[in-house]
């Protein structure tokens, strides 16, 4: 018998829509699953946005009061896609109400809030999941499989960068994403993904050293509603950017792997270049989100003059691909990753077993971010230590 899981979504901006579409697509893609989502209620403080989301995405109800989502007796899962500064309050309330929680990254607007959110969910005994959607690309999953099988031998090097251009226009408005009072900058926004994926592929980090820079120090103040993609003009009143546009890390992992991670939101050239390259004693592999349906792999063969990288194209033999397309080379996209993510979360809820990535994995990211922030001030290597709330 198929288990229906009642869903309530808080925050109906672009990401709220992406999560809601993902739940709808679970019905279409994971047809043999013994669980299915039911979109009960959506919430946004802008009534027109909440009402439009209900009509477009198929929710049974809408509200402008997010607490009504928690109070609804048929909601089992609360999906939080509101601005980062609201996450902790919402997580605490959802946990107190006994609801399972899907939260977009970063769980807190800073690492300390993430630790408090993890504590609240742990104390309440609710299941959690976090929107680290890049984990779910079929060829990222396949790369993890190759690593687990030891196909690259002993791992030695890890290099990653997440370069996005979403804030490269100096007249992009000063949204909350650019203000320290609402949290860290790129270390939180894209760095959460980069650190989580490094953990998944390589393992825990032992110590880090980082630097930072803010290249665009003032931006136009927003006029009315908008997002961090909205643009102003040179004659608009300006405000100060108070968090970082760029950060670069040197990383030493607990297993001895040495690495670098860079991230930037204002760079020109790359559009959404999220890549990693891993080297081992028996081979190497590399992946780039801009070509997410390709993986480049090399297996060392000293007797072969042509032992360089080979290109693998995603196909039904790779994890999750067959849910979307029956043949190789028929690529998946960003929304498909959110669909896989939603299906894995619902599977966790249906089974009553905590899955990954949950708030525990978000806390591991926060531990690293805390060490990075310390290194900005000390200008030296900092040990990664747990900030878990007892």
Image (cartoon, rainbow, N blue to C red):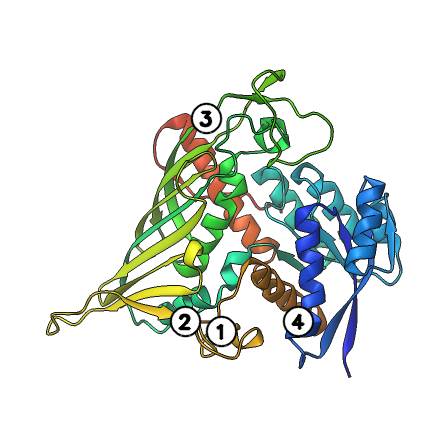
Q: CA distance from mark 4 to mark 1?
A: 16 Å
Q: Residues within 10 Å of mark 4 (few under 14, many from 20)?
A: some
Disc 2 vs disc 1: Cβ atoms closer than 8 Å?
Answer: yes
Residue in the foreground of this view, choosing between 41 and 257: 41
Q: Which residue is mark 2?
A: 145
In the image, what residue occupies the spot 59% across and 27% down? 179
On the image, the x and y values in percent for residue 14 come to 67, 47
Q: Which residue is mark 3?
A: 214
User: Can residue 122 be seen here?
Assistant: no
Disc 3 vs disc 1: Cβ atoms closer than 8 Å?
Answer: no
Where's the N terminus, which quadrant? Answer: bottom right
In the image, what residue occupies the spot 59% across and 22% down? 233
- Is residue 240 found left or right of 198 in the rendered image? right
Residue in the foreground of this view, choosing between 57 and 355: 57
Task: Please tell me which of labels 3 and 4 falls first in the chain.
Answer: 3
Q: Which residue is mark 1?
A: 319
Q: Which residue is mark 4?
A: 347
Helix, strand or loop under label 1 = loop
Q: CA distance from mark 3 to mark 2?
A: 38 Å
Task: Please tell me which of labels 3 and 1 falls first in the chain.
Answer: 3
Task: Please tell me which of labels 2 and 1 falls first in the chain.
Answer: 2
In which quarter of the view is residue 77 placed?
Answer: bottom right
On the image, the x and y values in percent for residue 157 come to 28, 54
In the image, what residue occupies the spot 65% across and 64% down? 342
Circle 2 or circle 1, nearest the eye: 1
């Amino acid at each position: 018998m198929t288990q229906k899981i009642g869903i309530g979504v808080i925050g109906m901006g672009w990401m709220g829509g992406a999560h809601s579409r993902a739940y709808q697509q679970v019905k279409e893609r994971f047809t043999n699953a013994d669980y299915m989502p039911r979109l009960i209620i959506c919430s946004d403080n802008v009534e027109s946005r909440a009402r439009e989301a209900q009509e477009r995405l198929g929710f049974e109800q809408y509200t402008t009061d997010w607490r009504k989502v928690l109070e609804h007796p048929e909601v089992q899962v609360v999906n939080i896609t509101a601005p980062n500064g609201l996450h902790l309050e919402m997580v605490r309330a959802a946990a107190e109400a006994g609801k399972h929680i899907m939260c977009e990254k970063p769980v807190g607007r800073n690492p300390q809030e993430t630790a408090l959110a993890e504590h609240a969910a742990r104390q309440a005994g609710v299941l959690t999941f976090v929107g680290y959607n890049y984990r779910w690309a079929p060829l990222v999953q396949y790369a993890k499989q190759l690593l687990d099988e030891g196909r690259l031998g002993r791992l030695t090097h890890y290099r990653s960068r997440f370069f996005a251009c979403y804030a490269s226009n100096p007249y992009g408005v000063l949204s909350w994403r650019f203000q320290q009072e609402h949290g860290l900058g790129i270390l939180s926004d894209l760095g959460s993904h980069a650190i989580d994926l490094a953990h998944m592929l390589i393992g825990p980090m032992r110590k880090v050293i980082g630097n930072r820079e803010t290249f665009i120090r003032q931006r136009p103040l927003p006029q009315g509603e908008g997002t961090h993609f909205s643009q102003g003009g040179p004659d608009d009143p300006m405000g100060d950017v108070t968090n970082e546009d760029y950060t670069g890390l040197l990383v030493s992992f607990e297993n001895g792997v040495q690495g670098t991670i860079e991230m930037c939101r204002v760079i020109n050239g790359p559009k959404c270049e999220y890549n990693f390259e891993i080297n081992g004693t028996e081979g190497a592999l590399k992946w780039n989100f801009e070509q997410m349906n390709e993986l480049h792999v090399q297996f060392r063969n000293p007797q072969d003059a042509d032992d360089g990288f080979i290109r693998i194209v995603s196909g039904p033999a790779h994890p999750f691909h067959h849910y979307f397309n029956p043949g190789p080379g028929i690529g998946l996209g960003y929304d498909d990753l959110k669909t896989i993510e939603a299906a894995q979360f619902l599977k966790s809820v249906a089974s009553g077993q905590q899955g990954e990535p949950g708030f525990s994995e978000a806390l591991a990211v926060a531990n690293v971010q805390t060490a990075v922030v310390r290194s900005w001030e000390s200008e030296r290597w900092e040990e990664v230590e747990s900030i878990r709330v007892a």
